Image (spheres, rainbow, N blue to C red):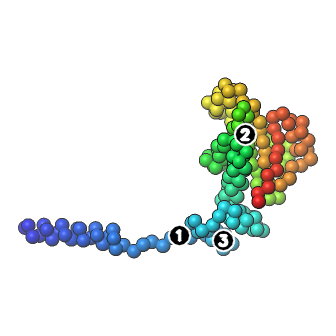
Amino acid sequence: MNNTFIIIILMIIFAIFINVFLKPQKKKKQYKKKNNFVRQKNNYTDMDFYKSLKKKKNTLTRKEKKIKGDLYEKYVSKYYQNLGYTVWEHGIEKGYKDQGIDLFLKKENQYLFIQCKNWKDWKITDTLIKKYRLKARNYMKNNPKISRIILDFNYEIKLVMITPKDCYTQKAKKYLKENSHIIEYKIIPMN
């Protein structure tokens, strides 16, 4: 009986050894996108990926649009960090549930709500800007803790819409000019 028990234990140890140390390694997966675009882990830069999306002539998938938007948000985030702002990448963290606020920026007594738009052929209208204002107001109502901090420390609040190119209609520019004390737009091209 002792010999049988020892043999069973040795077989179990041998099976574990084979499973752990001699198991064949799995190949790394390639992530394929439409139109033969292949993206491998750690084998690209954000800018390379952004440029490849920019070159595509047909419509981007929802996932590609999200990636493109996130890359632009990160770019704008770094831009403002270089200017000394503290940045919360809210849109990247919350995804589609960001409630219309992509970035929160804080510097001294200034608190900025940022909406980044990296659209290819769309125009930003005054209606879209009004919707953004409403989303920012609703965000403040739905997040009383953040509202309390902003109000308690007497921050100057400003809404900012940022795009990589001038895609604002004349009506939108007029609306922005009339409401420049609370909302502005910036054009920050992505190099």
Q: Is mark 1 on a helix, strand or loop?
A: loop
| Residue 102 in sight | no
Q: Name the residue under label 3.
A: 37
Q: What residue type is labelled 2?
A: Phe
Which one is earlier in the sequence, the residue at label 3 or at label 2? 3
Q: In this view, does 62 lie above or below 28?
A: above
For this rendering, which residue is in front, 47 or 97? 47
Q: What residue type is labelled 1?
A: Lys
Taking the view exactly as shown, the residue that stands out farthest to the top is 152
* Structural distance between the alpha carbons of marks 2 and 1: 38 Å
Q: In this view, does 64 lie above or below 156?
A: below
Q: Is residue 118 above or below residue 85?
A: below
Task: Specify few, some or many for label 2: CA neighbours under 10 Å numbering under 14, 14-19, or 20 or more.
Answer: many
Q: Is mark 3 on a helix, strand or loop?
A: loop
Task: Specify few, some or many for label 3: CA neighbours under 10 Å numbering under 14, 14-19, or 20 or more.
Answer: few
Residue at image location 23% in from the left, 68% down from the top: 13
Q: Is mark 2 on a helix, strand or loop?
A: strand
Residue at image location 81% in from the left, 34% down from the top: 182
* Structural distance between the alpha carbons of marks 3 and 2: 34 Å
Which one is earlier in the sequence, the residue at label 1 or at label 3? 1
| Residue 132 in sight | yes
* Structural distance between the alpha carbons of marks 1 and 3: 14 Å
Residue 87: where, in percent of width, then height?
Answer: 66, 43
Residue at image location 63% in from the left, 71% down from the top: 38
Residue 9: where, in percent of width, then height?
Answer: 18, 67
Residue 115: where, in percent of width, then height?
Answer: 74, 45
Q: Mark 2 points at which residue?
A: 113
